[in-house]
Image (cartoon, helix red, strand yellow):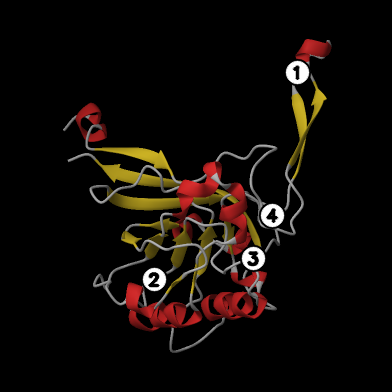
Amino acid sequence: MSKESINKNFKYIRLSYTLRENSLVHIGLNPLKIRPINRISQGDNYNTSLITAENHCGTHIDAPAHFILGGRFISDYSPEELSFTHPMVLDCPKKPGELVDVEDVSKIRDDKLDCLLLCTGFHQYHDTDPKLYLEQNPGISPGAVYYLRDKFPKLRCVGIDSVSMSRYGHAEESVEVHQAAFRENEDFGKPLLFVEDLDLSDIDKNTQIQEVIVVPWQVGDLDGAPCTVLAKIGLR
């Protein structure tokens, strides 16, 4: 089989947003800044820019160190640990402020599941209603996280198409949700990774995702980082 024919069987799409100065960030975080340093148009020999960004801006990945003292940093993860060959998109439409709960995730039957993408439909508000997107985002319940870790021991990553896995304005719930995912527990296997602020606008019920690859910024000793998320899509 030729390389050309192989390549026609699939394509890659991005499930992450492009970072820009007007990129949405979780309320309370500093906005992204991109400042020109050198410009060819101003007589310099090359272009350079200074990027000032919080490590949880835009589409980003949370490692256990985000909420767990002594937890792993995102730079501790190998490429293999950030590649997922049994992903699934769970269609779970949510209204503003609602939670993905145990009833939603109990529909999953794939015991090989290693990456779960929660499609709440809230990505539709990312550009059309930023205020709603940031202030009334859906999240996932702590109980649903515990259920996933208990029932799917091969699961390593959960992503969502809202600004955070936890609802804005629910501080205690936020801590519980993240600790439920990141806490070491011999009954639940290894801690999960969270990917937040996914762009699932190109995904529908007919999309066949064969693989998900998460590529974080490679900065040492960070509890999380902006990332590019790629999905390998089957065409046949």
Residue drawn at (46%, 61%) of the image: 159
Q: CA distance from mark 3 to mark 4?
A: 12 Å
Query: Residue 112, image x and y in percent?
Result: 28, 69
**Nearer the camera: disc 3 or disc 2:** 2
The tag earlier along the polypeptide, 3 or 2, is 3
**Alpha-carbon span between mark 1 and mark 3:** 34 Å
Q: Are marks 2 and 4 in contact (CB under 8 Å)?
A: no
- Check whether the beta carbons of the residues at disc 2 and disc 1 lie within 8 A of each other: no
Horizontal side of 141 relative to 33 (left or right) equals left
Q: Which residue is mark 4?
A: 55
- On the image, the x and y values in percent for residue 145 come to 45, 77
Residue of label 3: 73
Which of these two is toward me, 129 or 50? 129
Q: Which mark is residue 46?
A: 1
Q: Tell me which label, 1 or 3, sits earlier in the chain.
A: 1
Instruction: For marks 3 and 4, give the one nearer the viewer.
Output: 4
**108 sits left or right of 132 in the view:** left
Q: Quadrant of residue 83?
A: bottom left
Pointer 4 or 1: first along the chain: 1
Which residue is disc 2 drawn over?
155
Which amino acid type is shown beneath numbered disc 2?
Answer: Leu
Which three-letter amino acid code belongs to the residue tagged 1? Tyr
Q: Residue at the spot x=24%, y=72% of the render?
A: 109
Q: Residues within 10 Å of mark 4 (few under 14, many from 20)?
A: some
Q: Quote the CA–CA distance across marks 2 and 1.
A: 45 Å
**Disc 2 to disc 4, C-alpha distance:** 24 Å
